[in-house]
Every structure is written in C-alpha cells, then in structure tokens.
Image (tube, rainbow, N blue to C red):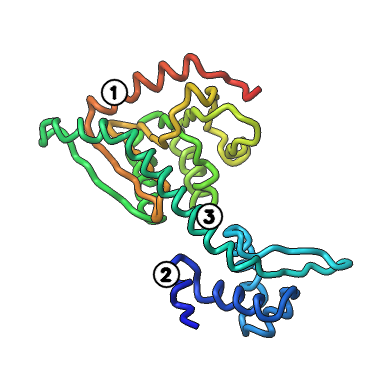
C-alpha cells in the first residue's frame, strides 16, 4: 500500500505507522504499540493524542488499562472534510480583512511599511518587537490566547516576564463566552481583559502598539502581517477604545 498518500493529507510518518498498526492488530496499549512499531512510548502517547484530535483513533478502558483502537478508515474522509471546512473558515476570515489590506496599498509608500512573518519564529519576532518598541501599552483583540499558549509555551512565559520588566500594560478584548482561554493573573499580571458578546465581536486577532498594527491569521503556518504606519495605528487605537468602553469587565 502506498502510505505516502496518508502523508500528503497531513499525517506524519509515526502517525501513519501507529494508525496502520492499530488497524492490523486491534485495540492495544501504548506499551504494545511501542513494541510493535519501535517508537518510544513517550512519542507514542504524543502521536496517539494527535491521531485522536484528527478523529482517527479512539480509546477505551478495560479494567484499569487504557486501550487505543483505530477508527474506521472512513474517518479519513471525514478528516479531509474537516480540513476543507477549516480552510473555508480561514478564507472567510481573510475576506473580512481584505478591504482593510487593500486600503493599505493606497497609502503613500514612504509612510507605510508592511512585513509578513510566518510560523512560530514569526510570532516570536513581533512579540519581541512589542517588548522593544511599545511605549506604555499594547491593545489586543481576538480569541487566540490558547493558540499562543500551545504554539509558544516557553516563550510566552518570557514575553510576560519582559512586559512586567518594561512596565508595558496589555489590554485584551475577547469574546464573552464560557470557557474562553485567558492567561492567568500570576503569569500575565500586566494584562487586563474585557469581553464582548459574539454578535459584537470581530475575531480577527489584532495587536496595536507604538505606530504598528499586527494582524495574525492562524493558518498553517500561522502568519503575522505587520503594518507600520502612524495613521493606521491611530485609527485602530480609536476603534479599540470605543470597543473597550462598551466591553464588559466581567465574563458573566
């Protein structure tokens, strides 16, 4: 069988090896899977979690032991459909900001600088730039705190430490709903949250600081678009302040 097809749709070599092994041998413990595939058990657990996220593996308990089993191969079609829907949602998000991005192209070139950063290192770059260039505060809208925590768990601790050190305040407007992710006060002691109802809320993840606006799209890879222009930054700042006034300081 040409397993490279599975690789082309987004599965890693170890994910493919574990999934095919489970299809052949049925429900198994992580130890058994490790023995059959030659993959270290700690890595087996990581890959099983990723396969469960994709809907390709489930687990059951037999007594005190946890057994993993492959989902029906039909789930691969469902996985592809889910990916297609995710891309469609990302396209819709991009459509929302296209008019703003188009407007930037009409500004005088000498007054505007646009840079694009991709992946985890790109996210780190603009977060470090906040520490370097933000004077007093950074204004943030969006609902992706959890994504930063997942993509940059070690770096985010350093980022919040540097915010405290530089006495830079963060104000964040996020969506008002149960279970929305927020960084804890112990870590993000200079961050203040307010909340808007979903119908009032624009989920585009945006940072405003100094004379810069950064728009983050959580595609694959994550992409950060940095626009350096004083007038644009001021426009976004005024809009943020309007939302801040109507946002609730309490989630409930």
Find disc 2 in the rendering and name its residue. 8
Would you say the residues marked 1 and 3 are in contact, meaning their CB atoms lie under 8 Å apart? no
Is 187 on the left or on the right of 1, as rendered? right
The span from disc 3 to disc 2 (Cα, nearest Å) is 30 Å
The span from disc 1 to disc 2 (Cα, nearest Å) is 44 Å
Q: Pointer 3: residues within 10 angstroms few (<14), some, or many (20+)?
A: few
Q: Pointer 1: residues within 10 angstroms few (<14), some, or many (20+)?
A: some
Residue at 20% across / 30% down in the picture?
103
**Can you tell which of label 1 and label 3 is closer to the viewer?**
1
Mark 3 and mark 2 lie on one chain; the one further toward the N terminus is 2
- Looking at the image, how many numbered discs can be counted on the residues? 3
Quadrant of the snapshot with the C terminus = top right
Residue at 55% across / 44% down in the picture?
146
Is 22 on the left or on the right of 86, as rendered? right
Q: Pointer 2: residues within 10 angstroms few (<14), some, or many (20+)?
A: few
When asked about the image quadrant of residue 188, the answer is: top right
Of the numbered discs in the image, which one, if any, rests on residue 154?
A: 3
**Can you tell which of label 1 and label 2 is closer to the viewer?**
2
Would you say the residues marked 1 and 2 are in contact, meaning their CB atoms lie under 8 Å apart? no
When asked about the image quadrant of residue 98, the answer is: top left
Q: Position of residue 192 (x, y in %)?
A: 54, 28
When asked about the image quadrant of residue 132, the answer is: top left
Residue at 41% across / 16% down in the picture?
242
Where disc 1 sits, the SS reads: helix
Residue at 41% across / 45% down in the picture?
88
Find disc 1 in the rendering and name its residue. 234
Where disc 3 sits, the SS reads: helix
């Amino acid at each position: 069988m040409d397993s490279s097809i599975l690789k082309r749709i987004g599965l890693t070599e170890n994910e493919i090896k574990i999934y095919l092994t489970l299809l052949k041998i049925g429900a198994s413990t992580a130890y058994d899977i490790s023995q059959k595939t030659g993959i270290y058990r700690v890595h087996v657990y990581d890959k099983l979690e990723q396969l469960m996220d994709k809907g390709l593996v489930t687990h059951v308990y037999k007594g005190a032991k946890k057994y993993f089993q492959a989902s029906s191969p039909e789930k691969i079609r469902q996985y592809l459909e889910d990916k297609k829907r995710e891309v469609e949602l990302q396209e819709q998000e991009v459509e929302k900001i296209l008019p703003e991005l188009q407007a930037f192209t009409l500004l005088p070139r000498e007054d505007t600088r646009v840079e694009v950063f991709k992946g985890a290192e790109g996210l780190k770059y603009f977060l470090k730039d906040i520490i370097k260039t933000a004077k007093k505060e950074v204004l943030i809208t969006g609902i992706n705190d959890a994504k930063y925590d997942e993509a940059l768990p070690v770096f985010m601790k350093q980022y919040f430490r540097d915010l405290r050190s530089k006495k830079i305040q963060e104000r964040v407007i996020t969506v008002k709903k149960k279970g929305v992710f927020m960084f804890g006060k112990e870590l993000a002691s200079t961050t203040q949250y307010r909340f808007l109802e979903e119908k009032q809320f624009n989920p585009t993840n945006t940072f405003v600081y100094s004379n810069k606006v950064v728009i983050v799209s959580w595609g694959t890879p994550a992409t950060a678009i940095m626009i350096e222009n004083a007038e644009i930054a001021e426009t976004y700042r005024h809009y943020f302040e309007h939302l801040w006034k109507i946002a609730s300081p309490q989630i409930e």
